[in-house]
């Protein structure tokens, strides 16, 4: 396929292989994909980068501490999965370092996401996480150094993915995982470990796509006065009301506004 410059084979693809006697096996075709996760290439303004095929759900992992929980970054990871049409679960790892870790999950629970509080060190939440993964293809994503590989090492007996201490000075991760890799789970299903990112691009989501990538904003927005309300300064905006009432987290609303601004700038023809 490489010689024919056909489509790139991705982690998670089912392929047709030709195995002829002693010669090396070759991939002849890629089976139709039931899903495709892609995001923007770092640096390149509008290039898309496919990450994995046939993923059933995206598990967005953050650390309660070291590195500190970053709601905006987490919301961006969630939005990329939503924009790819994939279900999302949120994991708050390193709970052993932060007694109040569970409170970080409130904005996502309000949004309707399943939230798991875990510790790859102490073992907290690992059984529930294993249940979440059973029988499905799950992709772990999130910032670098939050413990994605460490969690997978706890979940899958015999797996020894490389992990590394976060920098003691900056508390930042070190980009230890360098490529997406898929591994079988015990209860059936597969997990895909991916390299952590410092940021994740939105690859030219239109402003309308941004609203769609925030199911909680969309849900509250159904009651806005104007059908085309973008939930900024418009009168009788049900989304702003929800923020005021505490049913939509300020952080979620702030992330939506920032990403909407970004999408509008990117959509300008001269940008
Ligand atoms: N205290 C504590 N440390 C953890 C936990 N999970 C992971 N760590 C540590 O955090 C550091 C980073 O863990 P990794 O598993 O390499 O993180 P990662 O998310 O895979 O990072 P990248 O591959 O760079 O994306 C390692 O030193 C782990 O031992 C946890 O639950 N509690
Ligand atoms: Mg890793
Ligand atoms: Zn509105």
Image (tube, helix red, strand yellow):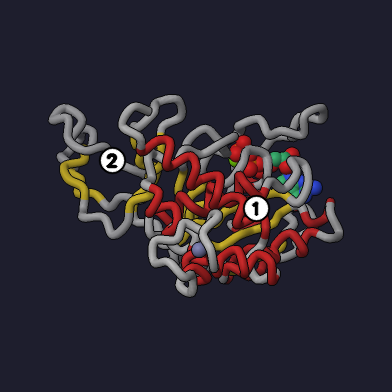
- Quick one: quadrant of the N terminus? top left
Q: Which residue is mark 1?
A: 151
Sequence-wise, the earlier of marks 1 and 2 is 2
In the image, what residue occupies the spot 38% across and 59% down? 85
In the image, what residue occupies the spot 75% across and 56% down? 119
In the image, what residue occupies the spot 46% across and 56% down? 230
The spot of residue 19 in percent (x, y) is 19, 42
Q: Which residue is mark 2?
A: 9
One can see residue 27 in this view:
yes
Give the camera-side residue of 75 and 244: 244
**Crowding at mark 1 (Cα within 10 Å: few <14, some 14-19, many 20+):** many
Asked if ligand 1 lies within 8 A of label 1, the reply is: yes
In the image, what residue occupies the spot 49% across and 59% down? 214
Q: Secondary structure at mark 2?
A: loop
Q: Against 21, is 271 above or below?
A: above
Give the quadrant of residue 246: bottom right
Q: Secondary structure at mark 1?
A: helix
The spot of residue 18 in percent (x, y) is 17, 43
Give the camera-side residue of 128 and 91: 91
């Amino acid at each position: 396929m490489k010689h024919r410059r056909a489509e790139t084979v991705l982690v998670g693809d089912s392929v047709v292989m030709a195995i002829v006697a002693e010669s090396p096996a070759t991939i002849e075709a890629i089976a139709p994909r039931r899903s495709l996760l892609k995001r923007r290439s770092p640096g390149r303004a509008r290039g898309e980068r496919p990450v994995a095929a046939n993923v059933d759900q995206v598990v967005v992992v953050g650390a309660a501490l070291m590195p500190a929980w970053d709601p905006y970054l987490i919301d961006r990871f969630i939005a990329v999965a939503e924009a790819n049409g994939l279900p999302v679960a949120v994991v708050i790892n390193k709970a052993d370092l932060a007694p109040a870790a569970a409170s970080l999950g409130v904005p996502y629970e309000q949004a309707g996401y399943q939230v798991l509080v875990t510790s790859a060190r102490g073992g907290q939440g690992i059984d529930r996480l294993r249940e979440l993964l059973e029988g499905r293809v799950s992709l772990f994503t999130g910032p670098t150094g939050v413990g994605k590989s460490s969690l997978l090492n706890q979940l899958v007996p015999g797996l020894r993915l490389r992990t590394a201490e976060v920098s003691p000075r900056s508390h930042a991760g070190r980009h230890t995982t360098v490529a997406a890799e898929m591994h079988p789970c015990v209860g059936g299903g597969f997990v895909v470990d991916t390299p952590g990112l410092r940021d994740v691009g939105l690859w030219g989501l239109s402003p309308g796509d941004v609203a769609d990538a925030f199911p909680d904003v969309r849900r509250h927005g159904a009651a806005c006065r104007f059908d085309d309300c973008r939930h900024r300064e418009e009168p009788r905006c049900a989304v702003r009301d929800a923020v005021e009432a505490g049913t939509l987290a300020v952080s979620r609303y702030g992330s939506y506004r920032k990403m909407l601004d970004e999408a509008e700038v990117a959509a300008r023809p001269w940008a």
